[in-house]
């Protein structure tokens, strides 16, 4: 199975618009064959590989399964186990990572596709709730991007809003390309305490209020951030 999995992973990274659907169906077949929990779920839905011709029809496991079961293809000792934030007070969802190098290749390929190489950016993390947990996949990904950015000011800033504001203003003035990745409530707090023009900064909003503020619809959130940061999209 290992050789089959390696071949399939190579296909995934080489996919294009013409081959995407066929590769999705191969992944579906692989998961169905090697993940007993997923296979049982698909059989109960009567949506097995023989019933599905398009990627849109592939069944997805409900998130609750990741809280109650170890969702894995075969048995292996994971290199990492990432957990959800658990802010709803329920059990956390767990993601068992067999191969961190494959995990990194996946998110770095996606990042490069949309933004280019991380080394051209100053990458700033504003993720207090995630850092406090220590097993967040988001923190893992952002830390990797920070390490690859090579900018001395790249890093996590927790609640150090004055220093974060100083770095952003310095970068804007010098024309340094900057990405600010922040959990929703922290971005709002920061933008209200230090309103500034972030129209030249890429802002990635992630997560939610984590119990720190009242939840709001995405449109309302974006209106607040556009008002305090002068971003127009």
Image (cartoon, rainbow, N blue to C red):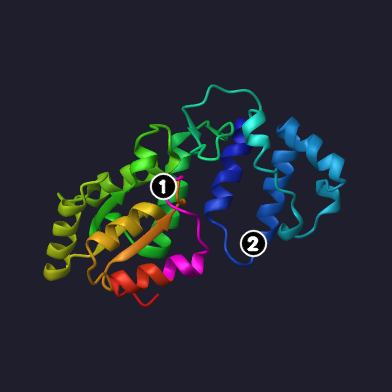
Q: Quadrant of the C terminus?
A: bottom left
Say which quarter of the image contains residue 104.
top left
Toward the front, the furthest residue is 214
Q: Is residue 199 visible?
A: yes
Q: Residue at x 26, y 69 (%)?
A: 198
Q: Which residue is mark 2?
A: 19
* N-terminal label among 1 and 2: 2
Q: Which residue is mark 1?
A: 212
46 vs 131: above or below? below
Position of residue 44 measured from the top left corner of the image (x, y, whole percent): 86, 40
39 vs 47: above or below? above
Toward the viewer: 76 or 69? 69
The residues bearing labels 1 and 2 have C-alpha atoms spaced at a distance of 44 Å
Magenta-colored span:
211-222
Q: Residue at x 64, y 67 (%)?
A: 18
Is residue 215 highlighted in magenta? yes
């Amino acid at each position: 199975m290992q050789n089959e999995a390696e071949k399939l992973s190579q296909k995934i990274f080489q996919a294009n618009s013409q081959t995407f659907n066929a590769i999705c169906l191969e992944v579906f077949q692989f998961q169905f064959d090697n993940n007993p929990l997923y296979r049982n779920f698909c059989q109960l839905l009567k949506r097995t590989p023989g019933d599905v011709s398009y990627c849109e029809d592939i069944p997805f496991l409900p998130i609750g399964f990741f809280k109650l079961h170890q969702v894995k293809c075969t048995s292996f000792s994971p290199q990492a186990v990432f957990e959800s934030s658990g802010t709803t007070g329920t059990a956390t969802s767990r993601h068992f990572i067999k191969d961190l190098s494959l995990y990194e290749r996946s998110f770095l390929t996606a990042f490069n596709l949309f933004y280019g190489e991380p080394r051209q950016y100053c990458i700033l993390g504003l993720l207090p709730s995630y850092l406090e947990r220590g097993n967040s996949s988001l923190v893992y990904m952002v830390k990797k991007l920070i390490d690859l950015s090579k900018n001395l000011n790249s890093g996590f800033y927790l609640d150090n809003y004055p220093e974060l504001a100083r770095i952003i203003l310095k970068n804007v003035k010098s024309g340094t390309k900057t990405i600010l990745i922040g959990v929703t409530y922290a971005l709002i707090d920061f933008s209200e305490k230090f309103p500034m023009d972030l129209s030249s900064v890429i802002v990635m909003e992630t997560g939610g209020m984590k119990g720190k503020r009242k939840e709001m619809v995405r449109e309302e959130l974006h209106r607040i951030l556009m008002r305090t940061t002068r971003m127009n999209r």
